[in-house]
Structures are given as C-alpha cells and as structure tokens.
Amino acid sequence: MPYVTSTGTRRTGAVAGRLGFGVPGCAHPLVAPAEWAELARPYTPLHWAVLNVARGPGARPDPHCLAAAVRLHEARGRVLGHLDVRFGTRPFGELLSDAHRFLEWYQVDGFYLDRCPTERPGLAEVRRIATTLRALRAPAYLVFAHGTHPHPSYVESADQLVTFSGQWADYRWSQAAAWTADYPPERFCHLVHGVPRTHLDEALRIARWQGAGTIYFTDRQGHGQADAWETLPGYWDEIVSRIGPGVTE
C-alpha cells in the first residue's frame, strides 16, 4: 500500500522551482536517433536520461549507445544506467555486474533502479545496493523508480524517488504523501503517459502542486509503460518551451 497521507497544502517550494525532464528510457539510438539528438540539444532542461541497452547494459559494448551517452555528457546531461531490481528479488551479484559494465562501457553518471521495492522490509537491501553503487562511482546519482510513494526512509538513500509512474487518468486524481513536504522538489519525479495536449497545463500544475521537480509527460501509449517512453511526446517542443531552458547543475 502506498504511503499516502495527503494534505491539501500547496507546495510553495515546487512552484518557485524550475521543472526539468527525467527521461526513463528512449528506444535504442539506432531506432530512435532523433529522440537522442533532441535530448542533447543545447538548453534542453534535462535532469537525466536512462540508458537501457538491452534490459541493462547488454552483453558487449554498443558503439551507438556510447555515442549517444557522449553527446548527452557534452550537453551537460546526466546519463543513468538502467538496473532492474525486480522488487528486491534480483541477485546482488547480477546488479553489481551490470553496474560495472555500465560504468566501464558508457561512463554513466549514476543509476536508475527500476522496480524498486516500496515497503520497509526491502529497505536494507536497497541501502546495500545504493552504498555499493556509490562506492563504485563517486558521486553516483541514484534514482529509485518506485512508481508510487514508498516508505519514507527510502528517501535517505536516493538522490531522487519516482513517486508516480502511470497513466494520466490516474495522475489527475493522485495525491502526494504528506511526508514529501519535508523535502525539496528535486527529490521527486513524476512519469505520466497518455497525457493529452489539451491537459498539459493541468498536468504541469499537478506536478508543481505535489512538489515534483522532475517530470516526463507524454501523449504516447503502449502495451506497457516502457513502450510509452520509447519515443518523445508529440508536443515535445511545446513542453520544452513551457518549462524553459536549463542545464543540469
């Protein structure tokens, strides 16, 4: 059960802050070259983009993925390696092996822990993973992709939590957990698919109200959430202009 004890209090800090994009995984650069080129455009307000070669780093170095990562680095964007935690069931050794390959082959800036546990019993293992990843690459930027509000203690081990990942029909009625008000907007990310262009302003208001500093909204749909993230939204230029120029600090 998500840890939501919402209040109607407006998050004034989020209103004052600048939103930016967290891109959870465009398709392979050979399939989506235009998407990767757009992410590396100057002044795109990109906080991070996930590199997912083949449900992880792949079996061998991929020159096309390396080139895409280099372009993002040159544009001062963060590149995160995709690690599937499988809700805490993935063997630690497998995760560590994937992390080493991401660092060696693509010089990633951190990691995106997909399907991260949300309950307190999973906390100790996730802390172990986070500590090890930061020892491998200091500083490593870590995003825990819960997709819902986890136990509040998870925030202590991550740079950012994905506290919503899902469709627009659910997002527009969603509520923030009261404990999130104790942290600045840059600690939270919302990923929403199926957002119509006509509701883009409403979606941005919800993100600011709930205190999310990083967002990814798309009108795309798919058989699964991952399919929806593979291409940029049809209103990409519009949402970039609404958020405004920016770079990762």
Image (cartoon, rainbow, N blue to C red):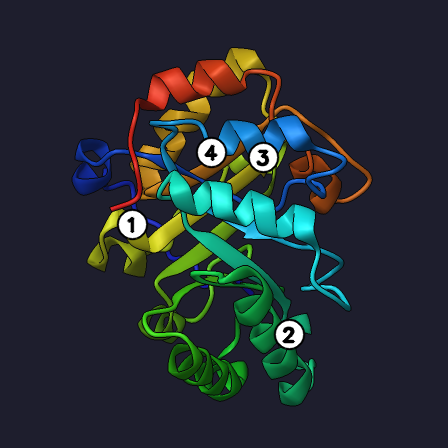
**Residue annotated with mark 3:** 36
Q: Mark 2 points at which residue?
A: 98
Give the mark, 1 or 4, whose residue is nearer the N terminus.
4
Contact (CB < 8 A) between labels 3 and 2?
Answer: no
Give left or right: position of 179 versus 103: left
Above/below status of 165 relative to 240? below
Image vertical order of residue 107 relative to residue 245, above or below: below
Q: Give whichever of discs 4 and 2 has the lower sequence position.
A: 4
Instruction: Count neighbours of disc 3 (C-alpha within 10 A) and say few if under 14, some if 14 to 19, many if 20 or more.
Output: many
Numbered tag placed on residue 40 in the rendering = 4
Q: Mark 1: few, some, or many residues within 10 Å (few <14, many ≥20)?
A: some
Helix, strand or loop for disc 3 = helix
Q: Residue at x 64, y 40 (%)?
A: 26
Kind of residue at badge 1: Glu
The single residue placed furthest to the right in the displayed view is 223
User: Which residue, given by chain and number where applicable, does mark 1 sit on?
Assistant: 186
- Quarter the N terminus occupies: bottom right
The CA distance from mark 3 to mark 2 is: 22 Å
Q: Can residue 130 be seen in this view?
A: yes
Asked if marks 3 and 4 touch (Cβ < 8 Å), the reply is: yes
Find residue 62 and report its image quarter.
Answer: bottom right
Count how many numbered circles sit on residues in the image.
4
Specify which label sits upstream in the sequence, 1 or 2: 2
